[in-house]
Each structure stands twice: as C-alpha cells, then as structure tokens.
Amino acid sequence: MAEIELSHLNRQCLDRRIADKEIIIHEVSAWNIARNQQATVVNWQFTTTDARIKLKRLYPVLTNVGQN
C-alpha cells in the first residue's frame, strides 16, 4: 500500500524539477491533505491463502523445534 501511495505522489506531485525544499514541503503537504480527503481504499484481491499457494517457495516450512 505504501508503494502505491509513493507512486501516486511521484506521478501527481513530484514529476518535475522543484526549486527548493520549502516548495516540496508545501506541495507534498497539499497533496497529502487532498489524498486523505479522498479516503481511497485498497481492494486487495490477492489473499493470504492465494499467496501461500502461489509463493510457496518463499514461505518457510516451520517445524516444532525443541519439542520431543
């Protein structure tokens, strides 16, 4: 979700040369206020179960270490 927001920030606000720090602070602040007012939600369609199946090689197999 953070990557999605950073991508939007970059495309909608930071996609040009900006002269100084104060302008960046002002632009990002205004963008942030507008973005929060939109109250956009993310509709996740890739569930944890789907991830465990599709990305099985990335999930370690845990065993009961220390139990007899």
Image (cartoon, helix red, strand yellow):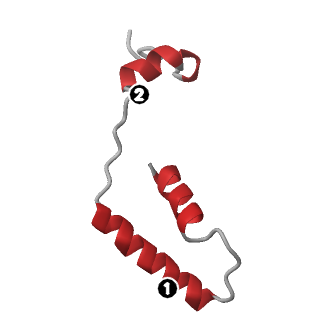
Three-letter code for the amino acid on which mark 1 is drawn: His
Labels 1 and 2 touching (C-beta < 8 A): no
The answer to whether 64 is drawn above or below residue 5 in the figure is: above
Give me the disc on residue 59: none
Residue at the spot 57% in from the left edge and 88% down from the top edge: 23
Secondary structure state at the residue bearing disc 1: helix
x%, y% of residue 51? 45, 23
The C terminus lies in which quarter of the figure? top left
Q: Does 11 sit left or right of 18 as displayed? A: left
Residue at the spot 31% in from the left edge and 49% down from the top edge: 41
Residue 56 versus residue 10: which sits nearer the camera?
10
The answer to whether 19 is drawn above or below residue 5 in the figure is: below
Residue at the spot 37% in from the left edge and 29% down from the top edge: 45
Which tag, 1 or 2, sits closer to the chain's start?
1
Q: Name the residue under label 1.
A: 26
Secondary structure state at the residue bearing disc 2: loop
In the image, farthest residue toward the top? 68
Three-letter code for the amino acid on which mark 2 is drawn: Phe
Crowding around mark 2 (Cα neighbors within 10 Å: few <14, some 14 to 19, many 20+) is few
Q: Mark 2 points at which residue?
A: 46
Q: Does 23 sit left or right of 49 as displayed? A: right
Crowding around mark 1 (Cα neighbors within 10 Å: few <14, some 14 to 19, many 20+) is few
Residue at the spot 62% in from the left edge and 87% down from the top edge: 21
Say which quarter of the image contains residue 37.
bottom left
x%, y% of residue 28? 49, 76
x%, y% of residue 52? 45, 19
x%, y% of residue 20? 66, 89
